[in-house]
Amino acid sequence: MKNEILKRLITAILISLISFFFIVLGNYFLILFLLITLSISIFEWKSLASNIYILIIGFFYLIFSFSTFYLLRDINLSFLIFTLLISIFSDIGGYIIGKLFKGPKLTKISPNKTYSGMIGSYLFSFLIGFIYIKFFDIYNFQLHVVFIVFYIFLIASINQLGDLLISYFKRLKKANDTGNLLPGHGGLLDRIDGMIFSIPSSYLFYMILI
């Protein structure tokens, strides 16, 4: 189990570093990176979609999701990084704590999801969220702590729900993973399943409330 966790952590760190490199770089490099990532995601989604309607809806949703990623990068880079870190550590916390403590299953949709994993997801999200806030000025102005707590909880929750939704489609197709591109993760969609929902949510949240 330790080797499995280590492999997953190494993959997550490498993918995150590559992603943050292109995010900070911006411009045409980021566009190219997003187009490649989007293409792989669409290809993997095609293997999960059980009918043409789900395929088309997912196709347009992925385009929308990646578009909001680019738009949020243009609007506020720091806010995007803040959101990504919450999503990434939500996955890491859920996986590590869930594997270590196990316990009751959260849902039949994804047999590997446990209540301990859900708690770990929130704990890691709040931990990285407040570390980031302490050492970086996210919005260039003060935010009330209640607002910050609500936002971290919201993004961590959406990230977990996104993970469960993709797990539901995998279950329909009787597939363990969306692909085999990433060691310890499976497909690319297995890695970003929560982010494709948390990023559009953060974009809408930012545009409406901030």
Image (cartoon, rainbow, N blue to C red):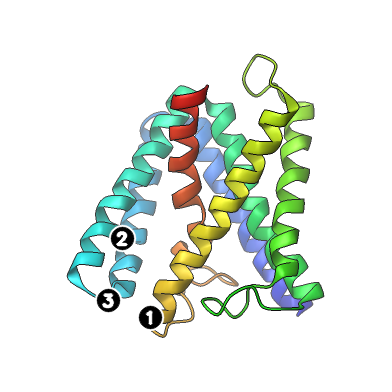
Crowd tier of the residue under label 3, counting other residues whose Cα lies within 10 Å: few below 14, some 14–19, many 20 or above: some
- Horizontal side of residue 154 vs 180, given as left or right: right
Q: Quadrant of residue 108?
A: bottom right
**17, 193: nearer the viewer:** 193
Going by the numbered disc 2, the residue's amino acid type is: Ile
User: Distance from label 2 to label 3 (Cα)?
Assistant: 14 Å
Callout 1 amino acid: Leu
Which one is nearer the viewer's eye here, 109 or 180? 109
Tag 3 or tag 1, which sits nearer the N-term? 3
Q: Which residue is rendered at x = 63% and y = 59% of the image?
A: 91
Label 2, residues with CA under 10 Å away: few <14, some 14-19, many ≥20: some
Question: Which residue is farthest top?
Answer: 141
Q: CA distance from mark 2 to mark 1?
A: 18 Å
Quarter of the image with the N terminus is: bottom right
Q: Amino acid at mark 3?
A: Ser
Give the farthest residue toward the bottom: 174
Count up the numbered dots: 3
Residue occupied by mark 2: 42
Q: Nearer the viewer, mark 2 or mark 1?
A: 1
Horizontal and vertical percent for residue 101?
A: 81, 74
Q: Which residue is mark 1?
A: 172
Mark positioned earlier in the residue sequence (2 or 3) = 2
Question: Looking at the picture, does residue 100 appear above or below residue 173?
Answer: above
In this figure, which residue is indicated by the disc labeled 3? 50
Name the residue rendered at 50%, 37% in the picture: 202
Q: Are marks 2 and 3 in contact (CB under 8 Å)?
A: no
Q: Is residue 112 visible?
A: yes
Percent x, y for residue 185? 56, 69
Disc 2 element: helix
Structural distance between the alpha carbons of marks 1 and 3: 8 Å
